Image (cartoon, rainbow, N blue to C red):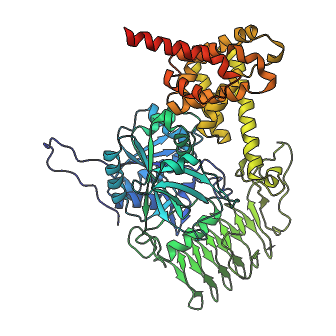
């Protein structure tokens, strides 16, 4: 299956053929695969006895991608050594970029932007992707979308996949609002843990062909315009593609960008991002769901039963078994629904079920291995049993043995556990982690527990947030955002912080608290007006305090109040703020504040007048009447001239 590099014999052509570029992120930037990846890159983890990155590169090669950037952070020299000596280096141009300081996909793309390595549209994907979808057709669809919509910056490849599907885990419960005719993404939200969603009324009112989709699975393939890395450079708080999507949707009035989906009915695509997906995808590759990337195809060296193996005639290899080269299996051993790597020695009377065994493993006579992952060079001495789940098939592996662990003889592990061969560093630095008590007399094994900081940000059952309603969570986030906004403006006033840095702070807070752009527009104005000790000031004292901050934030206002809609939100925020009884000292100065916005080309006259006409007859309207009359008189004089 590996494609060969096609070199054009005619070098005199004026038009060069279009070169498809892909960027592979060869890191997950999380620790969800530890302890298996304590000494190995995630993309070199074997799946059906082939490194994960082989599947990704084969997928790109099949689509005719000719140039690939492989961006490495963890174990970069392992990756570089492997890919440069692999078959893929002969059929594609591979550029390995190393940056051990990157902490996210956003950091990686910002670095590539700084290095000026991307000048054309490109495919963005992770190095742990297994897919057989028609990428070439997806690239053509993206190209046509960009021709019709010059503001389009990316196309997310999605697959129809209903809730409850084996590939959908708890964190893939997403709701997309899409324009049915153009496939433009209008809204995206996570909806796990709730039976209700809130959609802005204008989203429904302004889109006649609105389609809500809860049955889409992200294929983890994003086709990006060349401008995407620079957009991430301008927005340093965007760390993932999801952050970018949310950021663009929340700032469409500012960024003027659109995003689309390409929904596929056929094909397979899945990332190996945790132990659940590792076990699931491994089984599906063995069952040929990812055809042609399956063990009995000649797209590499793996076959179901590799040449050079030594199997006893009395051993039983049941459904879905893969073995690597130079592996031996003893008498009366049963292997079912499992993968065994290269250079393994499996003794007699052994049972291996629903497990994945990497290379160089020795399993002595009488051992039992159920629903486990056994990493490189592990030794299970005679009679050792890994039996956390004897009956029924549990998808998530129950026992994980890191590289070079030794257990036995006659050791018994009957509950979920992760073990490593060296004592992990304690959280406090000086505590000695004891060896596992059930490791056996020859055992070398220590319990491994991911530190709290390494876990995903999924709320625990005992957290207070879990007991709060959706409305309470929304209120809490809004209050926190507003409090941080107040602090940001007070620092800006005291320290004369530049408008650019204030905007960066606001965008970062907006993303952190998931605040909609209309709410941001509203609260920016109120936070600027909300000065400490205002109730003890006269109106003129208050104006003298506000004036410097208004000038410092001039470009902040221009950034957020560009459209008529956002300008109206600004005025409505003023109206709401001064409406309280305790803020009567603001009323006499509001016409001057509005005049400041008008004179600095932030608020348009038509918007001010339209807002004024809908004001109640007393209070603020009385204060602004003089300003509106001035507008009308100025217009009359202009017409007479």
Residue 449 visible, this orientation: yes
Which x, y percent locates residue 297? 40, 74
Which x, y percent locates residue 392? 70, 81
Q: Is residue 193 above or below residue 23?
A: below
For residue 42, what is the image quadrant?
Answer: bottom right
Which x, y percent locates residue 155? 43, 51
Q: Is residue 65 above or below residue 606?
A: below
Residue placed at 75% from the left, 36% from the top? Answer: 479
Please state which of residues 599 and 620 is positioned toward the viewer in this rendering: 620
Question: Quadrant of the image for the C terminus?
Answer: top left
Please state which of residues 181 and 159 is positioned toward the viewer in this rendering: 181
Q: Is residue 248 left or right of residue 493?
A: left
Residue placed at 43% from the left, 32% from the top? Answer: 115
For residue 488, what is the image quadrant?
Answer: top right
Residue placed at 23% from the left, 47% from the top? Answer: 17
Question: Quadrant of the image for the N terminus?
Answer: bottom left
Q: Is residue 473 left or right of residue 290?
A: right
Q: How many labels were placed on the picture? A: 0
Please state which of residues 620 and 189 is positioned toward the viewer in this rendering: 620
Please state which of residues 189 and 306 is positioned toward the viewer in this rendering: 189
For residue 534, what is the image quadrant?
Answer: top right
């Amino acid at each position: 299956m590996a494609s060969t590099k096609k070199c054009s014999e005619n070098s005199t052509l004026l038009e060069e053929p279009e070169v498809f570029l892909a960027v592979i992120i060869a890191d997950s930037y999380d620790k969800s695969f530890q302890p298996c990846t304590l000494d190995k890159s995630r993309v070199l983890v074997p799946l059906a006895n082939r490194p994960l990155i082989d599947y990704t590169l084969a997928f790109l090669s099949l689509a005719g991608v000719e140039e690939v950037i492989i961006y490495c952070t963890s174990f970069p020299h392992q990756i570089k050594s492997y890919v440069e000596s692999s078959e893929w280096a002969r059929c594609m141009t591979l550029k390995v970029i190393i940056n051990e300081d990157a902490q996210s996909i956003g950091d990686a793309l910002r670095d590539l932007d700084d290095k000026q390595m991307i000048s054309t549209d490109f495919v963005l994907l992770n190095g742990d992707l297994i897919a057989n979808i028609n990428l070439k057709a997806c690239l053509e669809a993206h190209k046509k979308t960009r021709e019709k919509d010059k503001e389009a910056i990316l196309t997310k490849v999605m697959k129809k996949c209903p809730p409850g599907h084996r590939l959908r885990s708890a964190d893939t419960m997403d709701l997309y609002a899409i324009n049915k005719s153009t496939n433009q993404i209008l809204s995206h939200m996570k909806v796990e843990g709730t039976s209700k969603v809130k959609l802005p009324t204008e989203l429904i009112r302004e889109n006649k062909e609105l389609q809500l989709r809860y049955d889409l699975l992200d294929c983890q393939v994003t086709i990006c315009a060349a401008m995407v890395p620079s957009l991430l450079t301008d927005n340093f708080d965007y760390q993932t593609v999801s952050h970018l999507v949310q950021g663009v949707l929340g700032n469409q009035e500012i960024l003027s960008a659109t995003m689309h989906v390409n929904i596929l009915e056929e094909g397979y695509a899945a990332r190996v991002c945790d132990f659940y997906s590792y076990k699931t995808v491994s089984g599906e590759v063995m069952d040929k769901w990812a055809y042609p990337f399956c063990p009995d195809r000649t797209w590499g060296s793996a076959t179901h039963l590799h040449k050079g193996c030594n199997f006893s005639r009395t051993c039983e290899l049941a459904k879905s078994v893969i073995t690597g080269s130079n592996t031996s299996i003893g008498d009366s051993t049963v292997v079912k629904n499992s993968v065994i790597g290269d250079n393994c020695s499996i003794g007699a009377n052994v049972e291996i079920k629903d497990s994945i065994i990497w290379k160089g493993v020795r399993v002595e006579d009488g051992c039992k291995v159920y629903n486990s992952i056994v990493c490189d060079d592990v030794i299970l001495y005679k009679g050792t049993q890994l039996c956390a789940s004897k009956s029924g098939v549990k998808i998530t592996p129950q026992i994980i043995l890191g590289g070079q662990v030794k257990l036995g003889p006659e050791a018994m592990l009957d509950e979920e556990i992760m073990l490593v061969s060296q004592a992990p560093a304690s959280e406090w630095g000086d505590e000695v982690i004891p060896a596992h008590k059930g490791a056996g007399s020859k055992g070398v094994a220590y319990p491994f527990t991911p530190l709290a900081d390494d876990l995903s940000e999924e709320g625990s059952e005992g957290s207070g947030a879990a007991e709060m309603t959706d409305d309470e969570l929304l209120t809490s986030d809004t209050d926190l955002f507003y409090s941080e906004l107040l602090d940001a403006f007070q620092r800006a006033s005291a320290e004369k912080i530049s408008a650019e840095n204030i905007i960066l702070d606001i965008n970062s807070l907006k993303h952190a608290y998931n605040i909609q752009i209309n709410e941001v527009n509203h609260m920016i104005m109120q936070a600027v007006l909300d000065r400490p000790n205002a109730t003890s000031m006269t109106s003129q004292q208050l104006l003298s305090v506000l004036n410097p901050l208004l000038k410092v934030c001039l470009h902040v206002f221009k950034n957020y109040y560009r459209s008529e809609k956002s300008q109206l939100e600004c005025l409505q925020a003023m109206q709401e703020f001064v409406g309280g009884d305790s803020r009567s000292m603001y009323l006499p100065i509001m016409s001057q504040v509005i005049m400041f916005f008008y004179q600095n080309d932030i608020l348009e006259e038509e918007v001010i007048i339209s807002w004024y006409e809908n004001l109640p007859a007393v209070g603020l309207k009385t204060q602004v009447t003089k300003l509106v009359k001035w507008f009308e008189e100025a217009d009359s004089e202009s017409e007479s001239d």
